[in-house]
Amino acid sequence: MRILIVDDNKIARAILQQLASQVKDLKVIGECESATDAYNFLQEQPVDLLLLDIEMPGMTGLELTKTMGNKRPVIIFTTSKKEYAAEAFELNVADYIVKPVTPARFLQAIDKARELVESNSTDVEQSDDEFVFIRDSNVVRRLKMDDILFAEAMGDYVKLYVPGKFYAIHTTLKSVSERLPASRFIRTHRSYIVAVSKIDTVQDGALIINDIPVPVADTYRSALNKRMNIL
């Protein structure tokens, strides 16, 4: 992977350069002290991965990311501050490392980035519908949309079910519904949203998804039947 390191701190750049040099398929092709320099660099040379600081003089790393839109390299943020994590992950970056960057944490982030770079190399355009980020305890976690079976409202929390487990996140079902693409998910009950493609059977007024029964309220039954295109 071709890497560009962007950080206004010379020591931070040197640490990332040294970590990258120990991984065979990584090649650092440039270093920039500012987001503006990085922007100009990216106009002239192809880059697979940005190791990008956030707080820099002038343009921040977050602002640079927003200027690039969808046509951009895979990004790993490296920063000394934790408070930007939620905003950063909303930009669909590969990972967010809080300094100091340890070898183990660096390799973990690189593995995530490599997966995204390889998927991009197959000319499959990444879209906002491919994954969603959730806050799981103190960790911001990336979930593939295709792994989500259904969402269940439980008081002040929503449980997102994936095969073999679920994640309880402090939010509302309305907020979750706004993040899940309507082309894949549908409301079946005031407390449930399901992935239409994950429905196995319908029996006794309930859906069966991965051997778990999910209720269907009369209010939503007609819309569900249309979406299922039952013969």
Image (spheres, rainbow, N blue to C red):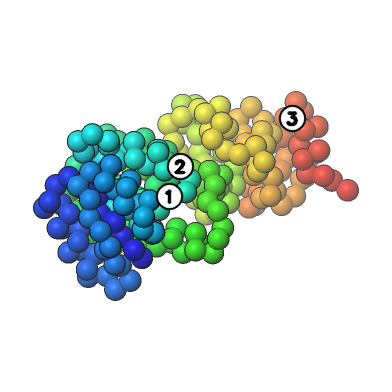
Left or right of 123, for residue 74: left
Which numbered mark, 2 or 3, is in the foreground of this view? 2
Q: Count how many numbered circles sit on residues in the image.
A: 3
Three-letter code for the amino acid on which mark 3 is drawn: Tyr
Q: Which residue is mark 2?
A: 69
Q: Earlier in the sequence, mark 2 or mark 3?
A: 2
Q: Nearer the viewer, residue 101 or 186?
A: 101
Residue for point 58% across, 32% down: 177
Q: Residues within 10 Å of mark 3 (few under 14, many from 20)?
A: some
Secondary structure of residue under mark 2: loop
Could you give the CA–CA distance between mark 2 and mark 1, rounded to whole angstroms? Answer: 7 Å
Could you give the CA–CA distance between mark 1 and mark 3, rounded to whole angstroms? Answer: 40 Å
Secondary structure of residue under mark 1: loop
Q: Which residue is mark 1?
A: 72
Residue for point 77% across, 28% down: 218
Residue 146's place in the image compared with 81, above or below, is below
Q: Is label 2 in contact with label 1 (beta carbons under 8 Å)?
A: yes
Could you give the CA–CA distance between mark 2 and mark 3, rounded to whole angstroms? Answer: 37 Å
Q: Decide if residue 210 is in sight here.
A: yes
Residue 62's place in the image compared with 6, above or below, is above
Three-letter code for the amino acid on which mark 1 is drawn: Arg
Q: Residues within 10 Å of mark 1 (few under 14, many from 20)?
A: some
Secondary structure of residue under mark 3: helix
x%, y% of residue 106? Answer: 26, 58
x%, y% of residue 144? Answer: 51, 50
Q: Which mark is residue 220?
A: 3
x%, y% of residue 180? Answer: 57, 38
Q: Which mark is residue 59?
A: none
Left or right of 144, for residue 18: left
Q: Residues within 10 Å of mark 2 (few under 14, many from 20)?
A: few
